[in-house]
Amino acid sequence: MLDTLIERIHAAHENHSPLIIQGGGSKTFYGGADEGEVLGTRKLTGVVDYQPKELVLTARAGTPLAEIEGLLAEQNQMLAFEPPHFGGPATLGGCIAAGLSGPRRPYAGAARDFVLGVRMIDGTGQPLRFGGQVIKNVAGYDVSRLMVGALGTLGLLTEVSLKVLPKPATEATLQFELDEAAAILKMNQWAGQPLPLSATSWHAGLLTVRLSGAASAVQAAQARLGGEALNDAAAFWQRLRDQATPFFDKRSPTSNQGLWRLAVKSTTPPLTVSNRLGGDAQWIEWGGAVRWLVSDRPAATLREAARTAGGHATLFRGDAPLDGAFTPLAPALATLHRNLKQRFDPRGIFNHGRLYPDF
Amino acid sequence: MLSPAFLSQLRKLLPPHCVLNEREDLLPFESDGLAAYRNTPDVVVLPENEAQVAAILKLCHAEKVAVVARGAGTGLSAGALPVDGAVLLVLAKLNRIKAVDPLARTAVVEPGVRNLAISEAVAAHGLYYAPDPSSQIACSIGGNVAENSGGVHCLKYGLTVHNILKLRAWTIDGQLLEIGNDSLDAAGYDLLALMTGSEGMLAVITEVTVKLLPRPERAQVVLAAFDDVAKAGAAVGNIIAAGVIPAGLEMMDRLAIQAAEAFVHAGYPLDCEALLLCEVDGVNEEVSADIYTVRAVLEASGAIEIRTAESEEQRLRFWAGRKAAFPAVGRLAPDYYCMDGTIPRGALPHVLKRISEMSAEYGLAVANVFHAGDGNLHPLILFDANTPGELHKAESFGGKILELCVEVGGTITGEHGVGLEKINQMCTQFSTPELVRFHDVKAAFDPDKLLNPGKAVPELHRCAEWGAMHVHGGQLPHPELPRF
């Protein structure tokens, strides 16, 4: 399988013919439209090595995330960045190439934080290996992490090694009726205290907080914070992770509404850009650091709002503006991006237009 | 040598006291923490603000003069070793903590701020900066980013790359890069990860925004003695398999234990082959639960003695021996050479056995200190630099240990960086196409190779020459060595 992929990429390089890398196809909505022949990875499957005592799992890129999570669960371990599946047959390669993380991210770390090494094929058909299977490794530049979130534009991931963690012994989810400003303040205050927080969400006047850890620690935190315990909490967090609640899907087809992800400094007060639409059109996650908006405001307005709040705005679902789904880069950074792309994929065959319109 | 014309241009950019080129002023900068490598710099500049850094870089770029950035000079891989004909750019005077935001749990600091100074400055808010390299009282945050420094607590709290949000950095042609932001991610490629651990090869950092964590409510440490290193190694895996991620999990072998005990009298048991220190931290109830689990696992793993620190004073005493292990070993011989390979923990018994065999072959003693939780090995090779040939012998032995680490699926450096010291072993760990891509990354930032030339990534001809030395049986690099 690997040889076939290398041959196809080599041929595409020779013929200057573009390729679209596709794993499970669960995130085709994400990023700009790309063009070319589909290069599928779903046959490149299998867990290569899993040593629970080493906290390291290595699998081929086309391995379904669900299979990996199932295997980890048997050993009471997990992918701590809680990657979204978006209801589809998400693969490990797609998960890492998209670099998206779920509700546990602000407290446990992001996809990039758990990547220890990759095997990949660059745009000339050259197989390469960076990083490794050990937790500490500073030999050479961190090319493995550079691949996380690059949306396949620098190469095809063929194998990924991840750090995994034990599953918490207990989890409990609490809910509090709070307005937006108060909820943002609480999420930040609690994150500064030694509490076993593992996820936070605010939507429509309701702050939802997950605690994870030893039973006694979760109980003590629960007693201290108060709130109402939420039953069926696992389903709540999974729906949020996978955007399977109606909020994420209620864009009106007749308008220009898009689902925008504003990544901001966690303490940013309620965004004025969200006011016009009312609180129902916003969902806050990650301790205040992500604000999901269903909005028809111009991209420039939303990007300026995010920039002012110390971050960036992404059109997550909807028709991307001309300058792309992601916030355009400052000129000096754009030059570095083009230089890196040129080196790893000199003929621009991989996922053209997926990350930025010009490469 | 730098031309007088260049030096006079340099002097126009900085106040007189910020440019050093008298021999006696230059000597303190001739090495970093790896003193076996020395080279007197041609000129040292100590800018006092970011604008001066940018101006220095622009001038050097225009004149095609190389630049070596240096922080506190505590690095252990000769990464900040001066290069002939280059400017040594010392960032120690950029040492202000510019802002602390307790609610957002961030601090904005200049690169010359000491690692520990950050935690001290935010302690009143119940916060701290997690990565704690053993040099944390002296090392500076700019160097921590350049080396992706870890520390005793990185299994649980991560390395520098996991604990920073944003950088201001300058390319060699004087362009400002704002990498990352105040949110938890950024658009485009993860240049924050690429910059972290890049050993001063890509850009010069002038500001770092770090993440702060709430101080754990409680920390407690368990000490366990074993009559066999392999059993101690297995115990480490068993603790993790039991679902505990210790805040620190350290191992010492017999020689290291005896040296540490003789030096600081920590009360370590002496009749054992290996000692484990396992610290857990967090909320009070979590620590109680974890201590219970850890003790049970250690017992089941065959520990011959287990002690739990019952007070903060005792906890610090348990740690005192480990923390003093390097200077303690330093009392056993005139010099020691510290290696930094990382291995999958399962390979520990095999690797320790091979190290002990090689120790006999080279006739040099080794004390092993080990960040056992994350597989990071610090063998300390004892030698006497005044005995002709011993330094070379120690270096050669060290190189062999690193190659062994690669052989078992590990890496040549867990936290100290490649610098100049491990540049040959990079040829063992990476293939030519991979090294080419590293050079490509460098070229994307610094096509003229002016930043820290000759470090971190070997030129391909160097690997070819080094490889050739290795393959030709009779032509090994150090023919003076006795071989068995």
Image (spheres, coloured by chain):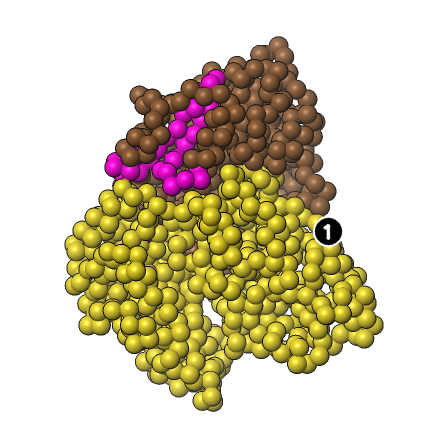
Chain colours: A brown, B yellow
Magenta region, residue range: A191-218
- Can residue A60 be seen at all in this image of the molecule? no
Q: Residue A247, relative to residue B416: is it above or below?
A: above
Q: Position of residue A240 (x, y in %)?
A: 43, 25
Q: Position of residue A297 (x, y in %)?
A: 66, 20
Q: Residue at x 64, y 17 (%)?
A: A296
Q: Position of residue B149 (x, y in %)?
A: 49, 58
- Where residue B304 sits, quadrant-wise, is bottom left
Question: In what quadrant of the picture does the C terminus of chain B appear?
Answer: bottom left
Q: Residue B473, relative to residue A207: is it above or below?
A: below
Q: Is residue A359 magenta?
A: no
Q: Amino acid at mark 1?
A: Gln
User: Along the line of sight, which residue is nearer the eye, A206 or A122?
Assistant: A206
Q: Secondary structure at mark 1?
A: loop
- Where residue A309 sits, quadrant-wise, is top right
Q: Which residue is mark 1?
A: B175
Q: Residues within 10 Å of mark 1 (few under 14, many from 20)?
A: some
Pointer 1 chain: B
Q: Position of residue A169 (x, y in %)?
A: 27, 37
- How many numbered marks are there? 1
Q: Residue B407, relative to residue B474: is it above or below?
A: above
Q: Is residue A190 left or right of residue B206?
A: left
- Can residue B250 be seen at all in this image of the molecule? yes
Q: Residue at x 32, y 68 (%)?
A: B321
